Image (cartoon, rainbow, N blue to C red):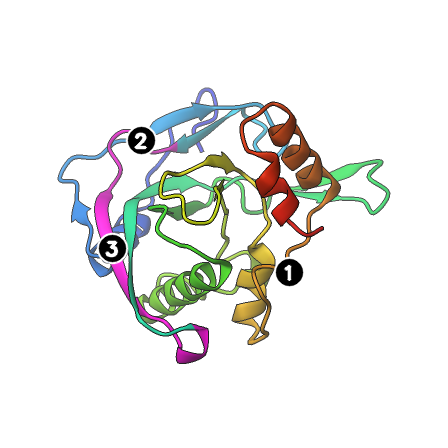
Amino acid sequence: MGHPGTLPVLNSKVIEFAVKLGLALNCRLSMTSKFDRKQYFYPDLPKGYQISQFDIPIAIKGFIDLDLPVEFGGGHRRFGITRVHMEEDAGKLIHSETGSYSQVDLNRAGVPLLEIVSEPDMRSGLEAAEYAAEIQRLVRYLGISNGNMQEGSLRCDVNISVRPVGQSKFGTKLAANWIMGDIAAFLKNERLSINEIKLTPVELSELIASIKNGTISGKIGKEVRV
């Protein structure tokens, strides 16, 4: 874990899994790789930094091909993979229903994990759901993970670039969970529309602030149904 006064020991199994995953995602493997310390102060990582990879990840520039279901429009899609890198996991914050306190579960802190960073190629929540489901099938087939989202074995962070219909240039990226419902629901064989998204108070405030400061237009804001 790299605590002061100790040296971190690399788990050889995570390297094997990283290489297998990189090859399965058609990535180019790095013959030389290294680890970096990402400094941040947050309760889920008490030592104040995370051992991760920044400028020389284990695998880069890959892709994954998918055939979308006919009921969702069908067609072939290719999603680019920016990188696959190794890092240590952080703890888990458990917040009370009242929001008056939080508890920290550090059971998984320091455990190695693999992170996949994808290119901004997905155009809907359904495409993101298909991508997540394919990654789940892939890691299970390779024996890298059981891929159970409810256990935290597979997690997804979503960044959304907001732009008007018909505009090709990417807009402002908002780090929100607006389409996570689509992803989770698809994996449970439910059917939701990307237009039926729900915003938390924090996400709604983020959207309003972005409209007020001009980073995204009010027209886009009106198209979001709360």
Say which residue label 2 marks: 35
For discs 3 and 1, the disc positioned in front in the rendered view = 1
C-alpha distance separating marks 3 and 1: 29 Å
Image: magenta residue range: 52-72
Which class describes the residues within 10 Å of circle 1: few (<14), some (14-19), or many (20+)? few
* Residue 140 relative to residue 25: left or right: right
> At label 3, which amino acid type do we have?
Phe
**Residue 38 falls within the magenta-colored stretch:** no
> At label 1, which amino acid type do we have?
Glu
User: Residue 66: image x %, image y %?
Assistant: 31, 67
Say which residue label 3 marks: 63
* Of 59 and 217, the residue lying toward us: 217
Say which residue label 1 marks: 196
User: Residue 82: image x %, image y %?
Assistant: 29, 44
C-alpha distance separating marks 2 and 3: 24 Å
Residue in the picture at 76% in, 38% down? 102
User: Residue 175: image x %, image y %?
Assistant: 54, 38
- Vertical side of 69 occupied by 9: above or below: above
* Of 141 and 130, the residue lying toward us: 130
For discs 1 and 2, the disc positioned in front in the rendered view = 1
